[in-house]
Amino acid sequence: MQHPTPTSQETLFLSPSDVAAMVRGQGMSATLQGMAACIEQDFLRWSHFDKSARLASHSADGVIELMPIADAGHYSFKYVNGHPKNTAQGLPTVMAFGVLADVATGMPMLLSEMTLATALRTAATSALAARALARPESRVMALIGNGAQSEFQALAFHHLLGIQEIRLYDTDAAASAKLMRNLQANPDSAGLRLRACASPLEAVRGADIVTTATADKTNAAIIRAGMLSAGTHLNAVGGDCPGKTEIHPEVLAAAKVFVEYEPQTRVEGDVQQMPPDFSVTELWQVLAGHAAGRDSAAQVTVFDSVGFALEDFSALRYLYAQARSLGLGQRLPLIPRLDDPKDLYQLVRPAFSHATGQLNASAPARPVAEPVAG
């Protein structure tokens, strides 16, 4: 997919309903495949990006983060939060929006919801990593943590890796029941067997892949030494900020660990528990053929995934291209249109009435640009 090109003085806005319509129109499988392809393309251009760890503002209840990144043509950022107590107030744990802009002018090309898109890109990234790290014959996955991300993880592994059975566990049985309702008798999950389990150990025992996607902001050890079979691939998604972990250090010490962007993961991932010299490999190196994935069929591999801005960059350019192709979204006059680009004051300059010979301070000097239907 080619990089999108900007349209002068137009900002395309995608609402949650627009992104949902895109998924329904294309199908979940095609959407995940397309997003994974964009993410892989950008990981293979790793050196082309100006990268930094995300900026985070932590509180007792959660975290608010800003995730910027740019290449020579485009800049993007995502605003995202993580507040586990939000569901008690009727709010999602994770809420996000993102911007894609043209580097040459700074013009924002796209303003998009990223709550749904983050779930899609996270699942696509998980499956992309597992294709490179898990055993090719993997067919059974345990999914620990059955909240808002879980259906997307299940479908990504089903469609992109051929997972046929998923064993579910959550401390909240209602969350597992919700996942089963959403996926049972769903065409997107045809051929996928789901089984609720009474404990993490029951879910994990003998699984080829284990995905942990819990939400609590605690130093937990959901996966402990001795729980994983030889050759298991562990997709650790939930540990994504300081003080929040899911994997016992003994599991990490015995495994080969892969990360997205090492400077960020050292602070936020499960490897925050490990010494500074603990060896990790960035995923892009495996995808580019610069480093090996698993060394043997019996090796335990871990993808310590915290989410990185490059994945949002990929998701935003995918959304922009697909929305323009499908005619989704609306154009917003986010940036003022000026007769003279050096005269911003014209937007607030009082209008002169030729009839009265007086200034009309309540009227604008010229019509302000109005939204254009998409």
Image (cartoon, helix red, strand yellow):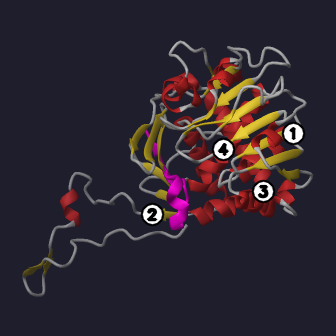
Residue 372 percent across, percent down from the top left: 48, 69
Residue on which the image places disc 1: 140
Residue hosting label 4: 213
Q: Foreground: 69 or 149?
A: 149
Classify residue 325 as left or right of residue 15. Answer: right
Q: Residues within 10 Å of mark 2 (few under 14, many from 20)?
A: many
Q: Which numbered circle lies on residue 332? A: 2
Residue shown at the point (57%, 25%) measured from the top left: 271
Left or right: where does residue 123 sit relative to residue 15?
Answer: right
Count neighbours of disc 3 (C-alpha within 10 A) and say few if under 14, some if 14 to 19, many if 20 or more.
few
**Nearest to N terminus: mark 3 or mark 4:** 3
Name the residue that disc number 3 marks: 27
Question: Three-letter amino acid code at disc 2?
Answer: Leu
Amino acid carrying label 3: it is: Gly
Sequence-first disc among 4 and 2: 4
Alpha carbon distance from label 3 to label 2: 27 Å
Q: CA distance from mark 4 to mark 2?
A: 36 Å
Of tags 4 and 2, the one toward the viewer is 4
Magenta segment includes 12: no
Which picture quadrant has residue 290?
A: top right
